[in-house]
């Protein structure tokens, strides 16, 4: 079962020093509208060929627009043997509501 964390929980855990990787699986044109600094970008369709770029020792928090695609990728990563994976619930839309209201909506 993939852990679900809210954007506020992500920020709290990151600020507390937890070693988190924010994996953004949105398409390049979505990033042009709104992106988060420090996020690693691998479009969803490229994850099967690029998941080896992720460090297994870190918690990977997967992000998309609303949380649907990211959940699918998080489940895929678990099947690849990642045991520290979470889905950012509500995606970048919820991030804009909870963390950064100035973030353009996608």
Image (cartoon, rainbow, N blue to C red):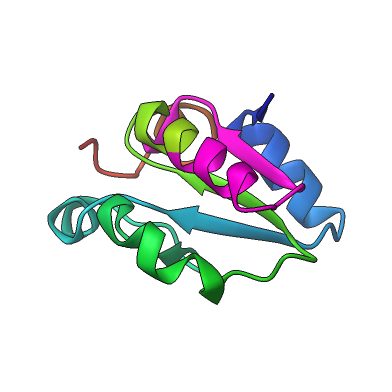
Occupied quadrant, residue 70: top left
Q: Which residues are magenta?
A: 73-92
Q: Is residue 28 left or right of residue 47?
A: left
Residue 37 pos. (x, y %) = 46, 66
Residue 97 shows in this picture = yes
Q: Is residue 97 left or right of residue 53?
A: left
Q: Is residue 48 left or right of residue 12?
A: left
Is residue 85 shown above or below 90? below
Is residue 90 shown above or below 10? above
Residue at image coords 45%, 42% = 73
Residue 30 pos. (x, y %) = 19, 50
- Inspect the magenta stretch and tell me whether residue 83 lies in it: yes
Residue at image coords 33%, 44% = 103
Residue at image coords 68%, 71% = 55
**Which sits in the foreground, 46 or 11?**
46
- Inspect the magenta stretch and tell me whether residue 21 lies in it: no
Residue 95 shows in this picture = no
Residue 51 pos. (x, y %) = 49, 65
Residue 11 pos. (x, y %) = 68, 46
Q: Is residue 23 left or right of residue 80?
A: left
Residue at image coords 66%, 29% = 2
- Residue that protrudes farthest toward the left in the picture: 29
- Residue that protrudes farthest toward the bottom in the picture: 53
């Amino acid at each position: 079962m993939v852990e679900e964390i809210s954007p506020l929980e992500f920020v709290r855990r990151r600020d507390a020093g937890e070693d988190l990787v924010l994996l953004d699986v949105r398409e390049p044109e979505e990033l042009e509208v709104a992106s988060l600094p420090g996020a690693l970008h691998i479009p969803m369709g490229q994850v099967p060929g690029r998941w080896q770029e992720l460090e297994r020792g870190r918690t990977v928090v997967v992000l998309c627009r609303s949380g649907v695609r990211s959940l699918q990728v998080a489940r895929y990563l678990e099947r690849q043997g990642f045991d520290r994976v979470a889905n950012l619930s509500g995606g970048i839309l919820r991030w804009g509501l909870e963390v950064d209201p100035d973030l353009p909506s996608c």
